[in-house]
Amino acid sequence: MLRVTQSNSAARAKSYYSTADYYTEGQELVGLWRGKGAARLKLSGMIDRDDWDLLCDNRQPETGEALTPRRKDERRVGYDFNFHCPKSVSLLYGLTQDQRILQAFRESVEATMEDIEAESKARVRRGGKNEDRLTGNLAWGEFVHFTARPEDGVPDPHLHAHCFVFNGTFDEQEDRWKAVQVGDIKRDAPYFEAVFHSRFARRLEELGLETRRTVNGWELTGIAPETLTTFSRRTARIEKLAKARGITNPDAKAELGAQTRSGKAKEMSMPELNHLWRSRMTEQELASLDAVRRRVGRDPIGEDDRAALGAVERAMAHSFERASVLPERTFLAEALRQGYGVASRETIERLAGKQPLIRATRDGRQLVTSLEVLEEEKAMLRFAREGRGTCRPIHLGTITFPVKNFSEEQKRAVRHVVTSKDRVVLIRGAAGAGKTSMMKVARDVSVAIAAENVILAAGTIGTTRILLNSAKTTPAIANPRIGKGLILHPSVPLIGIFDKTIKLLEGLDSATFVEAFGVTPGFIFETMGGLPAYGALLVPGNGKQVYETVSQFNQCAGFGTMLVDTPSDDNCVSLDEQGDVMVQYGLSDSDKQRLRTGVAIGIRMMFMAGAKQVIIPSNENFLNQENFDPMVGVYLTDIAQADLVERNLNFTPNRTLLTAAHLQATNKMSSSPETGVVSKHQRVWNVLTGTEIPNLYIMDSSIFPTSVGANPMQTIYTFAYIFSKRLLQGMA
């Protein structure tokens, strides 16, 4: 992390790095002067307290003269650039004191600060100008600390550095010191943070330490997440307090941290702390840490060109997912984050520079977009332009507006939307202008479709909704069978964790199934493919359990036990008073028993295939455990536990997760309107005459008369093929 904090108090700047804030028995290094500005002031090496205090008072240490013209008590004294290490690095250094790690950290900090210094500016006001001028020099003090602020009197290991930059930079053109302009630097802080971590991770890899990317950055490979949690007590306390107060903003959390600092209880030496820290670790954790320690200085890990290119390509996809134009440094920061450890900053930025980007400068800032985004925008504009005046209005009748709080301007906008003949209609308004309320009115107007043939293919729920809404004003299609007898093929996904690498995304596709049990007892095993996010949805338990399981994604395999469910009119799709869809579905007792049997067989199959754990997406107490906690996931570790699951799994709503992707049979094909909604020709029945409506058809899975007992894709394809041929032949 890189945090930039402004300081407006000379007294605070003088005391901030005193021994009052941190334990001092070897827990911090003596401050050093850094920067070209410090060299100009003839400051180098270890920081002298008198020199420091003079600069805090805006005076030149050598002469005592004013440094910059501004002398107000509440002026900006400087800026604290705060660099933080990943917790695994802090822990490794705290317990080993390996100077090679410290050197890599300090070199990374210093190199990044030199990058920042090169972009320092001063404001120019002489001669009627109002601009910033590049100066390229700063003066700062670097203070390195090894511990966090104490919790319960004892600090955790936390390697970090404070680089306090004084509010002065030398303008050679005007031959004087002036206040430094850091607005652009603070704006680009995420980029410089990524630069720092890219450098640091690469230096450690060159020392032989393998790194791994995490959700928020990177860590050393070989140190377990639970170990890091043990030594993150202060962070945990701040996060807990932030959650209780509803605080999510990182800056607000940082302020909360400042408000909750603990004072020191007693001075402790690093050997004493080392002993305390080791006492909090298990033998296995100590052994893992020692294995990581032994890698330092051994075979360096080289750059991975393929992984570096992959990092840049992922950054391209991620950066332009929600933005068509963005600052180039936003893209570069993402590329660096994607490539932590695998390649140097120079390699990542060189590969990023080769991407087919369009670049332009606006207000001194380099912006980028991609050729693909440009083509998409051109296509969107072309689609809109070519669609002007080409469409029938959505609605030409009377519009009912809310009685209250609906302005004439909003009414005009709604009328414009529903009466326009343009294919694309845009409404622009300020936040809080009522756009959402306005569009709800536009959405709810009735829509008339005039066509020679109307074919409903909106899926089991969508088609049913259209029919039910239309039936309100068209008695001929008001069939009481609409929406009845919903079939879902409810499925219980099973996840197996293996000792070997599976690489689920490179294995079987999701259309492979076992039909041996399809007729009797009536369930099918179907392969399951999905990204880690889908796996996270299925894993029961607390956040730590979910994280640990998803971290083993490449050792997981899964399939679903899919029930061939029994049709029942109680399972249906209907509309509420507002016209919104309601789905009502429940498993019969016999369906539950058949599904339990299928789940148990699936569990046994997993263990027989070599799984060391099997996970059911359920927090029911199916193992009959005493003191059962539904917030803690229970994972199966023995094949015999399948018997307990077969007896005790109840499929309790909101306790056991069922998935369904094969919705069907709500508008059944039948020989008469008394038993179905469409005829064998897929025409909707006229319930007033008992005959087919000649030009109203349904072509989706809602017309299935019962469960197809498998993935319905091929059945839908077949129906669509037959229907298309008949339609072209005039439904002869």
Image: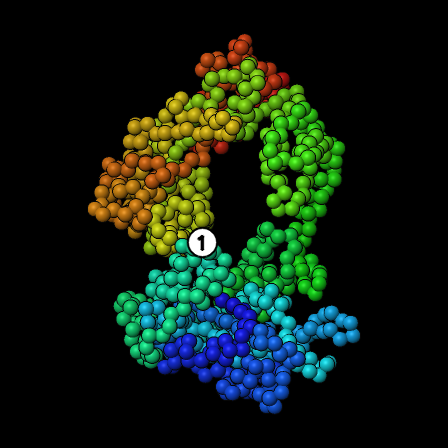
Q: Answer with left or right where residue 80 lies relative to residue 325.
A: left
Q: Answer with left or right where residue 100 lies relative to residue 473.
A: left
Q: Residues within 10 Å of mark 1 (few under 14, many from 20)?
A: few
Residue 666: x and y in percent read: 46, 24
Above or below residue 492? Residue 704 is: above
* Residue at left offset 27%, top offset 66%: 282
Residue at the extreme bottom of the image, as rendered: 63
* Residue at left offset 54%, top offset 23%: 469
Q: Answer with left or right where residue 406 lies relative to residue 127.
A: left
Residue 453 appears in view: yes
The three-letter code of the residue at mark 1 reads Gly
Above or below residue 28? Residue 345 is: above
Residue toward you, 13 or 574: 13
Residue 726: x and y in percent read: 59, 20
SS of the residue at dot 1? loop
* Residue at left offset 22%, top offset 47%: 627
Q: Answer with left or right where residue 369 lies relative to residue 703.
A: right
Residue beneath disc 1: 246
Residue at the extreme right of the image, as rendered: 127
Above or below residue 542? Residue 703 is: above
Residue at the extreme front of the image, as rendered: 73
Residue at the extreme left of the image, as rendered: 626
Quadrant housing the C terminus: top right
Residue toward you, 461 or 598: 461
Residue 417 appears in view: no
Residue 326: x and y in percent read: 64, 57
Residue 491: x and y in percent read: 38, 36
Q: What count of labels does the image hold?
A: 1
| Quadrant of the image occupied by residue 602 | top left
* Residue at left offset 31%, top offset 31%: 592
Above or below residue 601? Residue 715 is: above
Colour scheme in use: rainbow
